[in-house]
Amino acid sequence: MENWLLSIINEYGYIGIFVLIALENIFPPIPSEVILTFSGFVTTSTHLSIFGVVICSTLGSITGAVALYRVGLLLDVERMEKIVDKWGKVLRLTRRDIHKADAWFDKYGPWTVFLCRFVPLIRSLISIPAGMSNMNFTAFFVLTTLGTLIWNTVLIWIGASVGDSWHSILTYMDIYSSVVYIILAVAVATTVYWYFKKISNR
């Protein structure tokens, strides 16, 4: 896959970067780390500039994020209630669970959207629950733009700084991703533990 991504960037430049990053947001398995670090590297030997790459990649990210936000709007609370009414026993969910999750996102959603922009894979998918909870679009747009701009700028700058060694950065990104996933797993496990402990004490 990497060779395919790199050939597109080499051939289509800014437009290729925009399209690839937009698709990366909609189809998270496409690695933004590869796209962004290589895009930074090519600025050292082509007409592409770091500023131009940052702008195009950020616009692509926002386009993909807004698309997933719209998908989330289609799966609003009312529709989720219908799904739970039909499949709740299988999914082990109730309407109350849906409303609690929606209330949680209403309270912490803005910070969640911003911070998740720095978490591989989740950075894309977080747009869906934002739409499902009907998060204010302006707030979603601004926080998504800020988080994405920071993430893209850092990776592109690193790619440009290390030059031919850009590929070695991916090893460190894998380590970063693993650490973040472990932290998230521990946080989720802790939350679940305290939730069930609270229920058992009732």
Image (tube, grey):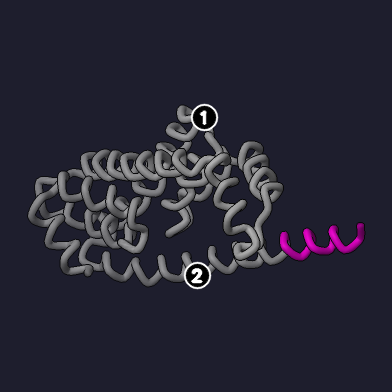
Query: Looking at this view, is 73 or 59 the one in front?
Result: 73
Q: Tell whether 138 sits left or right of 6.
A: right
Residue at position x 33%, y 45% from top? 64
**Mark 1: amino acid:** Asn
Upstream in the sequence, badge 1 or badge 2?
A: 1
- Quadrant where the C terminus lies? bottom right
Q: Position of residue 39 (x, y in %)?
A: 22, 54
Residue at position x 80%, y 63% from top? 196
Q: Tell whether 137 sits left or right of 51.
A: right
Residue bounds of the magenta highlight? 191-202
Residue at position x 53%, y 43% from top? 79
Query: Looking at this view, is 194 or 179 the one in front?
Result: 194
**Mark 2: amino acid:** Ser
Q: Tell whether 92 sits left or right of 45.
A: right
Q: Tell whether 115 sits left or right of 92.
A: left
Q: Which mark is residue 173?
A: none
Q: Which mark is residue 136?
A: 1
- Label 1 secondary element: loop
Q: Is residue 166 magenta?
A: no
Q: Is residue 193 magenta?
A: yes
Circle 2 sits on which residue? 178
